[in-house]
């Protein structure tokens, strides 16, 4: 009988897989961590001791310094965490190597009792020549942004989003020189008259501009390369001329409107959302936007006062045909706005879907208007879909005469359109 010698399996000792990675690959892996987590990896092994100083992404977040979410509601604990975060930011930047920085991200909040805070660390960030700077700060009374940020030649994306409870943060750089910048997002800021001139002169590559909940005191947006423009929940204090021949998408939602808007040289515009609300004492004397919208394929138009609608109607006789328009939404409509509805039915030969958001009915809405003010009878051959919304700001309002208004609107549409594919009411 032959003995079979059995050998026990020896355990293979395999090296740490992460430690075998190339430096570039390892840096890429570490870039998915927060900066605090990346620094903590320095204790793993000798090779890891200084890896964090060369990670291409710096990501600072106040949440990394909170014991739990309740610390945000405790002023003393929150301020202690804010101080720890600020100290950590400075220490990391001081020990940062001369390696390439791709992205800098900062998310924090500032106590509501604090005065305007100086973000001096942004000077050091700008010297590292990053591709992206993203800053989001909640609460507080504003932020002082150093000028060096606005002269960083490597910067392609700049995002400063504030949600402060006090005064707007004033953006007032002596000059702007951002030759590589393609995307700019600013929120809760105050922009003076010369900001627009400095911006488009110093940002020849800017393709996307977002301004949110901000005070706009400038009057000119002119760029040959801008493709996307959004002014959301802003206060517009002067007449604004928008002259952007490459513009594709436009979103204007102004909660305070004076002076009007002029759209000029916007032949590339395909998607537009315009929602305007004038001040009670405001004088909107120029709303020349129809010609600039004539090539859009998707249009949402919400004018929240009779004065704004009347100002728009002045330009109807000079408007072009909307040959590309397929989807249209009109907001805050009563039957007295029938001329506006008739205009788009008549001048949009390829319109497929029309959405009407009804306003609160007025006393005169029980009389069906079958003609325009000029006495002209209008008839459209066919419309694929009509959607009628009886909601205001996504909340159902129980109006006394809402059903009467709905019936009158449907009667009006059937009197002016020979055939409607389907009517949807919500």
Image (tube, rainbow, N blue to C red):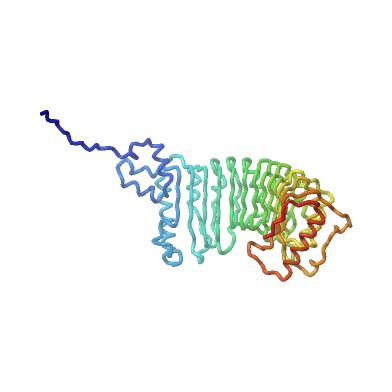
Where's residue 64, x and y in %? 41, 56
Q: Which residue is situated farthest in the bottom direction here?
A: 400
Q: Taking 314 as reference, is 126 left or right?
A: left
Kindly indicate the quadrant of the structure image that contains residue 168: bottom right
Residue 171 appears anywhere in the view: yes
Q: Is 392 located above or below residue 175 in the figure?
A: below
Q: Is 363 located above or below residue 284 in the figure?
A: below
Residue closest to the eye, 118 or 30: 30
Q: Residue at x 60, y 46 (%)?
A: 176
Residue closest to the eye, 5 or 120: 5
Q: Quadrant of the N terminus?
A: top left
Q: Quadrant of the C terminus?
A: bottom right
Q: Which residue is situated farthest in the right direction here?
A: 375
Q: Which residue is situated farthest in the top direction here?
A: 2
Residue closest to the eye, 56 or 247: 247
Where's residue 174, x and y in %? 60, 49
Q: Is 102 located above or below residue 194 in the figure?
A: above
Q: Taking 330 as reference, is 233 left or right?
A: left
Q: Taking 20 as reference, is 259 left or right?
A: right
Where's residue 184, x and y in %? 59, 48
Q: Taking 101 as reference, is 180 left or right?
A: right
């Amino acid at each position: 009988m032959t003995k079979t010698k059995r050998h026990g399996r020896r355990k293979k000792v395999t090296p740490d897989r992460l430690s075998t990675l190339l430096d570039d690959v390892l840096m890429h892996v570490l870039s998915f961590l927060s900066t605090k987590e990346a620094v903590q990896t320095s204790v793993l092994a000798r090779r890891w001791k200084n890896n964090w100083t060369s990670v291409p992404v710096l990501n600072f977040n106040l949440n990394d310094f909170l014991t739990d979410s309740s610390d945000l509601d405790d002023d003393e604990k929150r301020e202690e965490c804010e101080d720890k975060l600020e100290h950590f930011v400075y220490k990391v930047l001081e020990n940062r190597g001369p390696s390439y920085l791709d992205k800098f991200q900062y998310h924090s909040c500032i106590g509501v009792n604090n005065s305007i805070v100086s973000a001096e660390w942004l000077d050091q960030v700008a010297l590292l020549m990053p591709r992206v700077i993203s800053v989001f700060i909640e609460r507080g009374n504003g932020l002082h942004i150093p000028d060096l940020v606005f002269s960083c030649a490597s910067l392609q994306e700049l995002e400063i989003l504030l949600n402060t409870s006090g005064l707007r943060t004033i953006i007032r750089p002596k000059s702007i020189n951002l030759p590589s910048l393609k995307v700019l997002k600013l929120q809760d800021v105050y922009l003076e008259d010369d900001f627009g001139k400095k911006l488009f002169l110093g940002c020849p590559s800017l393709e996307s501009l977002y301004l949110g909940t901000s005070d706009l005191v400038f009057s000119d947006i002119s760029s040959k390369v801008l493709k996307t423009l959004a002014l959301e929940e802003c206060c517009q204090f002067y007449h604004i001329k928008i002259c952007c021949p490459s513009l594709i998408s436009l979103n204007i939602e102004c909660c305070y409107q004076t002076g009007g808007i002029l759209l000029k040289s916007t032949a590339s515009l395909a998607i537009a959302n315009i929602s305007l609300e004038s001040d009670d004492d405001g004088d909107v004397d120029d709303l020349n936007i129809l010609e600039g919208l004539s090539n859009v394929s998707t249009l949402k138009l919400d004018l929240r006062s009779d004065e704004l609608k009347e100002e728009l109607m002045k330009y109807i006789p000079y408007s072009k045909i909307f040959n590309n328009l397929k989807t249209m939404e009109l907001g805050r409509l009563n039957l007295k706005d029938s001329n506006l509805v008739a205009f788009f039915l008549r001048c949009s030969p390829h319109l497929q879907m029309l959405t009407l958001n009804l306003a609160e009915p007025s006393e005169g809405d029980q009389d069906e208007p079958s003609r325009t003010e000029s006495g002209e009878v209008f008839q459209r051959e066919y419309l694929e879909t009509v959607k009628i919304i009886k909601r205001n700001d996504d909340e159902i309002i129980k109006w006394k005469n809402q059903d009467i208004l709905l019936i009158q609107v449907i009667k009006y549409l059937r009197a002016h359109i020979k055939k409607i594919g389907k009517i949807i009411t919500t």
